[in-house]
Amino acid sequence: MKFVDETTIEVAAGDGGNGCASFRHEKYKEFGGPDGGDGGRGGHVYALADASLNTLVDFRYTRHFAAERGEHGKGSDMFGVKGDDIVLKMPVGTIISDAETGAVLHELLQAGEQILIAKGGDGGFGNMHYKSSTNRSPRQKTPGWAGQRKSLKLELKVLADVGLLGMPNAGKSTLIAAISNARPKIADYPFTTLYPNLGVVRVGPEKSFVVADLPGLIEGASEGAGLGHQFLRHLQRTRLLLHIVDLAPFDAEVDPVAQARAIVAELKKFDPALHAKPRWLVLNKLDMVPADERAARVQALVRRLRYKGPVFEISALTREGCELLVQKVYQHIAQVHQAQQPPEQIDPRFAPPADAA
C-alpha cells in the first residue's frame, strides 16, 4: 500500500430542507389552519480516528465528500426527514487544518475519537411554525439553511513513542525488525525504506511501546534533499529519538562522526523543538568490528562527537545488545509518560506495578 501522509479534501454538509406553506383541508373543518411542516436538517460530516488505518491513501483519489440534504417539509404537519450523516475514517494522529488559512481545526489523537468537521444546515420553518392567536393563517415559510462547505488539509503525524533516525543503510530497518513485529523491506542499497514503518515492541505482559522507522536522512534533508525531509514531521510526537550510527561503513572513506553531526544539524534546521528532544546514541553493526577493536573505536567516536548522553552498542543483525536497549527505552518512556499525564489518564502500557510505592 502506498504511504500517503498529506492530502487535501473538500467536504460539504447537507443543506436543510425547505419549510412548507400548507393549510389543512378536511371535510367539516372550515378553518383547518396551517399545517406546513419544517424542513429536515442536512447531514453532518464527521471524522473518526480509526486505529486500523496508518495512511491517508483513501483520500488521495476520492477528495470530495458530501452529506445528504434534508427533505422538504410537507403538509399535514409532516416534517422533512433529516439527511444522513457521513463518517470519514482517518488514521490516529491526523491533523485537520483549513486549506486556505492553514489554521489547525482538529487533531485526532485517540482511537475511536469522533469530531464534527462540517455541520449540516438546519431545516427551514413551515407556516405552522408561525401560527398564533393573532396570525391564524400565516403564509410565511423559510428555505433551509446551507450546510457548511470546507476545503481541508489532512496531515498525518504517526503516533510513535520512539523514533529511529540515521543515515541510509545505518541499520534502522534491521533494528525495528529485530525488536518489534514490523517487517520492513531490508536491502543493501540506500533508501530501501521509502515510507515510515511502525512496529510494536513487546517488553512484557501488557507492556509495550511503538517505534517508528523513517527513511534515512542525508545532509540537506530539511531543504528537501533525499527522502527523509518528507517524514521528519513524524518524529515531532515521539518521546525519544534513537540516533543509529553505522560503526562499520561499507565505504572506508565515510566518516560516521561527520554523518552523525550532519543529521543533528538537519534536525535543528527543521524544528528546534525536535532537536531538543531526548536523543540516545545507538552504535550499530558491532558484529562488523573485530572484538579487540570495539572498545577503542566506540570511545574514539563518542569522544569526537562530544556526546554526553546514553550510548548503546548493538548489532541489529545478531541482536547483540538489543534486549538491554529495549528495556532502557521502555523505562524511559514509562517515566516520561507517567510524569506528563494525570494518574487517571496514564496509558495501561506504562502504568506502574500495583505494588509500587
Image (spheres, helix red, strand yellow):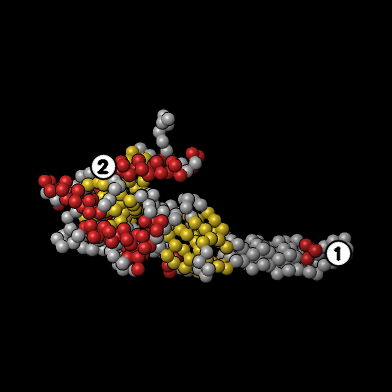
Between label 2 and label 1, give the one nearer the viewer: 2
- Residue displayed at 28% across by 44% down: 325
Marked residue nearer the N-terminal end (2 or 1): 1
Q: Which of 10 and 280 is in front in this view?
A: 280
Residue 297 position within the rendered picture, expressed as x and y whole percent measured from the top left: 16, 50
Residue 202 badge: none
Residue type beneath disc 2: Glu
| Residue at the spot of label 2 | 323
- Residue displayed at 26% across by 63% down: 191
Image vertical order of residue 330 relative to residue 21, above or below: above
Residue 78: quarter of image: bottom right
Q: What element carries label 2?
A: helix
Image vertical order of residue 54 relative to residue 222, above or below: above
Q: Is mark 1 on a helix, strand or loop?
A: loop
- Using residue 312 as the reference point, say whether residue 110 is left or right of it: right
Residue 49 position within the rendered picture, expressed as x and y whole percent measured from the top left: 48, 54
In the rendered image, the quadrant that contains the N terminus is: bottom left
- Using residue 181 as the reference point, say whether residue 239 is left or right of it: right
Residue 323: quarter of image: top left
Residue 136 badge: 1
Residue type beneath disc 1: Arg
